[in-house]
Amino acid sequence: MPDLPADYKPRSNTMKASDLFVKCLEEEGIEYIFGVPGEENADFMISLEKSEKIKFVLTRHEQGAAFMAEVYGRLTGNAAGCLGTLGPGATNLITGVADANMDRAPLLALTGQGSSQRLHKESHQIMDVVEMFGPVTKWATSVIHQDNIPEIIRKAVRVARSEKPGAVHIELPEDIAKLQTTTKPLQPQRFRRPVTDDKIVDRAFEILKQAKHPVILAGNGCIRRRASKQLRLFCEATGIGVINTFMAKGCVDMDADYCLYTIGLQARDVVACALEAADVVLALGYDMVEYHPNLWNEHGERHIIHADFQPAEIDSDYHPETELVGDLAHTLWMLNERVADNGGLTFDHSNQVATRQSMTEEIARHKDDDTEGSIRPQKVLWDCRQVMAPDDILLSDVGAHKMWIARHYQCHEPNTCLIPNGFCSMGFSLPGAISAALVYPDRRIMSISGDGAYLMNVQEMETAKRLNVNIVTMIWEDHAYGLIEWKQENEFGKHTDLTFDNPDWLKLADAFGWHGHSVENSRDLVATVEQAFAEEGPSLVVIPIDYRENLKLTERLGDIACPI
């Protein structure tokens, strides 16, 4: 037998790059990928088909896939994938990916691409997808060498999950996917987030001790369960009232005396009274995309303590004197320790008590309505709250109904009312409800859409039926883009033509194999929704909504006088 060369190395075990890609996703604990395959990601799909850990959900549009992945990320804190091919497949993904990124949901956007040998020139369906995704993701990259796949996926998931969470994009060219590789998946290594410095927390605590009327402005960072738990302990010990943004609903229980409900209508509401009376605002997990500070701190009159995972965004109306930068739950724990050591804190809560009472009356104002032909938004949401348990999940689309949901649908637990509020994309709630039902099949899942938003992703009704998810989708019908009409009326005293026709909703439901219901009288709403939830598979409930209440609310908000 001849001697082996000095540089001889035994042949290593190899696998196809697309197989390695899937194994790396498995190692990261990825459970779902939603999407529409194409020719350029065929190798990836064949590899994915062999996975026993990742479920692929075929959708009817890439935008729907991205919204499904977003909702999965918002509910679990883990990333799901959304898949599209090159060109139009990638461009169809981008709206949902941008929505996830701005609403702080971890997400992996996975796209195919043509052969790397033709990316430098004009070629069929070729465009710079990575460059396109750059502005709407935390990181976007292309796999240019098959051996880099483990590092890329490890980095992508870490970046997507790290505070503030968001979207990451990975492109896999078709020729790279076919190549052999000898690298192996990297085992995920978790790390603990940095915490706030003790001296700065001491400084913040001294400011709180000197305050007379402090208030908490809770943003989306507070719906992390550890943060919500510590926030509730802090409020129980201090009695400081909590005003939450649209995305922070449920960070404290709606029934707690210190819950001051929701702010964010871009108009002065009852809740603003407590904020206006505050001398110190403790802003927790707050993002300016949720409710811009020029609407509540235009003249910089309040001392702001900023507590979040990241430093405050630079803005002339949000210039915190004190910043507690680090893990938010740990920061709140540090404050709780100081409250306990101090024997508690005492403040004048008379203003927040009056504010809560006034807003509670607002929410219940039309709970006993008995109208026919059109139903007030307030009545619909009161009844929806009655049929939904504390852990059940309501998803709002974008439109006039979103404003009513934000104001009138309050929550007991975090992540039980999902509202797109950073990027605000219509078409969110139907695909989002499908994803929520996959995550929590034993909970009641309801989506509320306007008739404008619902048709933007109506094709996912087929996906819902194919998966046979138990969801109820409610449509508020007014035959118009109601929110735009509302805003135009407020600014110009008139509105452009925003009306349209609708399909026969019950025939549409039947065509997709759904159950369908129409409610004409407000007294029938609860029974109808209960029936819809009792049915096997997806159900549609259509309501003629009375949007005359929009301008009535505007008029009432303009006349608001604070209780004390």
Image (spheres, rainbow, N blue to C red):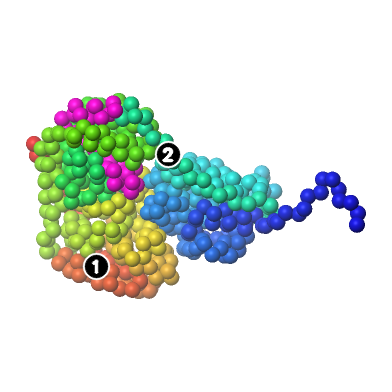
Mark 1 is on which residue type?
Val
Neighbor class of circle 1 (other Cα within 10 Å; few <14, some 14-19, many 20+) is many
Is most of the magenta stretch helix, strand or loop?
Answer: helix
Label 1 – label 2 distance at C-alpha? 43 Å
Closer to the camera in the image, 1 or 460: 1
Q: Mark 1 sits on what residue?
A: 529
Which secondary structure, mark 2? loop
Q: Quadrant of the N terminus?
A: bottom right
What range is drawn magenta here?
202-231
Per the image, the residue denoted by label 2 is: 193
Q: Is residue 303 left or right of residue 454?
A: left
Q: Residue 444: name its quadrant.
A: bottom left
Q: Quadrant of residue 546?
A: bottom left
> Where, quadrant-wise, is the C terminus in this rendering?
top left
Query: Residue 548: which numbered mark, if any?
Result: none
Query: SS class of the residue under badge 1?
Result: helix
Q: Is residue 93 left or right of residue 222?
A: right
Q: Are marks 1 and 2 in contact (CB under 8 Å)?
A: no
> Mark 1 vs mark 2: which is more N-terminal?
2
Relative image position of residue 215 (x, y in whole percent): 21, 36
* Percent of width and height locating residue 245: 27, 43
Residue displayed at 30% across by 38% down: 332
Depth order, front residue of 127/178 = 178
Residue at 31 percent across and 30 percent down: it is 201
Q: Is residue 527 above or below residue 377?
A: below
Q: What residue is rendered at 38% in x and 68% in y?
A: 469
> Label 2 is placed on what type of residue?
Arg
Residue 93 magenta-highlighted: no
Q: Is residue 380 visible?
A: no
Q: Is residue 218 magenta?
A: yes
Residue 92 coordinates in the image, percent (x, y):
48, 53
